[in-house]
């Protein structure tokens, strides 16, 4: 009996359609679902998704599709989104810029007019009417590490392979144009039998050994060194090496806000979040008092440092990055952290470490007037941490949620997804759809839990419809506090431009077509109601979508947000 793989191997011996080649490569990279919005210049290509083993998501709009693809890639390692020329692709750059800034590998495929139409400068719809068909690709090139225009079948397989490899290895978006007349052009199928080489770039061995010697020199001399892990340790796939280094060295370890979830927070050496003056209790003193700080994948942006309130010296710092290592003020370009960390682990001697002060391990809800039932940020986030379970994926939105999560201690194997550097409000709701879909595809027990503000939710609320259509079952908390709280603390506390129209959020699943029995909604306004919700096993384990209106005071915010907002306001005033 002939197997499916035998049939597929026989097919690959013959020339295949360009789009089959492209979609097969996506499937080989581990992409199972493709986000996007249909348009007349990509419709024929979309017919090939299912035969290539890919599922079409179909988002409410292109911006949401981009956010969803970003979230999907953060869980599965890479993603793809398809739009149409001009009107479709131009709704995507905000999401793609966020992926670029935060090192998320997204493959953006654009269905374009035929090569003949472009060559003749025809006056087509979705164009600027000036015969320039390259303007959108020129825009995209600023937000991509590779642009592949699939115009010549002879070159197309190598163009596709190069773009996908660069996307994966550099962990940033790429842009691929697929003209309508190229979709069914024939290319060599045999090439698909050879998987893409996704092995990371290798350091020069002599340079790598030298850098390892330099790092070991300072590390073995240090009396109370500490480790700080940040987001690029996740994005550049060095978490395995990072964890081994932490365990073998026995050093105290902290995470930056963007690195939340990168380290097992149940380890005895885990100390909490370091964000300068916005750090967990006792952390700032411990990190800034060390005589050697080893940062892994550090991103020293304003929101990630609580308004640039780090007080660390480069003379006492070793920075590990994907393309270079910096030891004090000496930089070693072309020597990436993956190889250096591996050799450090192999060659690390037992370190003579002087115990320093240990930051408090437990983050507990703030003691507040027991007679006050109001749910505040100081009380809620530590309490929420007690409800989380191993394997949860927690999304937090730009604003109160991103800063509130500082005060939540994670169980083992909990992932935090946020967009602290790019900081586009509305990101987390769109991303939640991609994350929930990816979590289902990888299997296992993963609750997808979204925390977003009411103002942020209103920007991308349509994606709730996509979650319903695909029977994704996240738990969604909408923090109802009457508007853009993070903006209020930066400027305009009582300004009308920071206000929003209040919605009946609990009615939205039904309005978006969710059938009775496939969802449940809640409204919580007091501490007792929050506690009752977290103690409800049906809520914690329910196999359907749940939406919670979580009411908090209009002018309340996590302390770290207030600090960062004040610093941002000062910086804006200076500039």
Image (cartoon, rainbow, N blue to C red):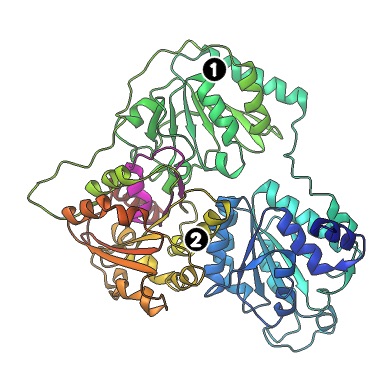
Please say if 426 is above or below 128: above
Tell me the tag on residue 537: none
Residue positioned 74% across, 63% down in the render: 23
The residue tagged with tag 1: helix, strand or loop? helix
Q: Residue 69's spot in the image, x, y percent?
A: 58, 61
Q: Left of 209 or right of it: where is 315?
A: left
Q: CA distance from mark 1 to mark 2?
A: 39 Å
Q: Is residue 118 left or right of residue 465?
A: right
Nearer to the camera, 465 or 61: 465
> Considering the image in quadrants, where does the C terminus appear?
bottom left
Which residue occupies the foreground of this view, 434 or 567? Answer: 434
For label 1, count other residues whose C-alpha is less than 10 Å away and answer few (under 14), some (14-19) or many (20+).
many
Residue 49 in sight in this render: no
Asked if residue 370 shows in the view, the reply is: yes
Position in image of residue 51 (x %, y %): 74, 69
Residue at 53 percent of width and 56 percent of height = 440
Residue depicted at 25% across the width and 55% down the height: 533
Q: Quadrant of the N terminus?
A: bottom right
Q: In the image shown, does 85 or 72 lie closer to the viewer? A: 72
Name of the residue lying farthest toward the front = 1
Q: Is residue 398 magenta?
A: yes
User: On the image, numbered disc 2 is attached to which residue?
Assistant: 431
Instruction: Residue 380: give x, y in percent of width and height.
Output: 25, 49
> Magenta segment range?
393-417
Q: From the image, tell me which residue sits under label 1.
A: 219
């Amino acid at each position: 009996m002939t197997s499916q793989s035998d049939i597929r191997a026989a097919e690959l011996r013959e020339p295949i359609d360009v789009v089959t080649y492209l979609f097969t490569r996506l499937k080989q990279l581990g992409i199972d679902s493709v986000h996007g919005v249909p348009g007349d210049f990509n419709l024929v290509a979309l017919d090939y998704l299912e035969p290539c083993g890919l599922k079409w998501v179909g988002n409410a709009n292109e911006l949401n599709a981009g956010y969803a693809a970003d979230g999907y890639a953060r869980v599965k390692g890479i993603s793809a989104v398809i739009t149409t020329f001009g009107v479709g692709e131009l709704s995507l750059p905000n999401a793609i810029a966020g992926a670029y800034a935060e090192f998320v590998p997204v493959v953006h495929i654009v269905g374009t007019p035929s090569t003949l139409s472009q060559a003749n400068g025809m006056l087509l719809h979705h164009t600027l009417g000036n015969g320039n068909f390259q303007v959108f690709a020129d825009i995209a090139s600023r937000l991509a590490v590779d642009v592949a225009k699939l115009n010549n079948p002879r070159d197309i397989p190598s163009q596709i392979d190069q773009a996908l490899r660069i996307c994966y290895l550099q962990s940033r978006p790429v842009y691929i144009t697929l003209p309508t007349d190229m979709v069914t052009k024939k290319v060599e199928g045999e090439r698909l039998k050879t998987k893409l080489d996704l092995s990371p770039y290798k350091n020069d061995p002599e340079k790598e050994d030298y850098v390892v010697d330099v790092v070991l020199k300072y590390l073995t001399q240090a009396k109370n060194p500490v480790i700080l892990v940040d987001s690029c340790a996740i994005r550049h796939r060095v978490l395995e090496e990072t964890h081994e280094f932490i365990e073998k060295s026995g050093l105290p370890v902290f995470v930056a806000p963007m690195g939340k979830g990168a380290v097992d927070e149940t380890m005895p050496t885990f100390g909490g979040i370091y964000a300068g003056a916005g750090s967990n209790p006792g952390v700032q003193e411990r990190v800034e008092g060390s005589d050697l700080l080893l940062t892994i994948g550090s991103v020293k942006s304003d929101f990630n440092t609580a308004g640039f309130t780090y007080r660390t010296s480069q003379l006492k710092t070793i920075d590990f990055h994907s393309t270079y290592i910096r030891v004090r003020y000496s930089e070693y370009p072309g020597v990436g952290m993956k190889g250096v960390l591996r050799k450090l682990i192999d060659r690390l001697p037992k370190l003579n470490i002087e115990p320093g002060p240990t930051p408090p391990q437990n983050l507990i809800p703030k003691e507040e007037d027991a007679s006050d039932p109001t749910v505040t940020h100081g009380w809620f986030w530590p309490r929420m941490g007690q409800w989380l379970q191993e394997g949860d994926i927690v999304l937090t939105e730009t604003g109160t949620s991103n800063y509130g999560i500082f005060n939540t201690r994670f169980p083992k194997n909990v992932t935090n997804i946020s967009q602290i550097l790019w900081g586009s409000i509305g990101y987390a709701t769109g991303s939640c759809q991609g994350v929930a879909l990816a979590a289902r595809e990888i299997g296992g027990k993963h609750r997808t839990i979204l925390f977003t503000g009411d103002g942020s939710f209103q920007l991308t609320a349509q994606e709730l419809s996509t979650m319903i259509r695909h029977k994704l079952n996240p738990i969604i908390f909408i923090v109802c506090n009457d508007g853009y709280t993070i903006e209020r603390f930066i400027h305009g506390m009582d300004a009308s431009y920071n206000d929003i129209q209040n919605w009946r959020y609990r009615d939205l699943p039904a309005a978006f077509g969710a059938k009775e029995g496939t969802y449940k909604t809640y409204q919580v306004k007091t501490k007792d109601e929050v506690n009752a919700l977290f103690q409800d096993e049906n809520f914690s384990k329910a196999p359907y979508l749940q939406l919670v209106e979580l009411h908090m005071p209009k002018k309340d915010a996590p302390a770290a947000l207030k600090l960062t907002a004040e610093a941002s306001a000062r910086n804006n005033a200076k500039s």
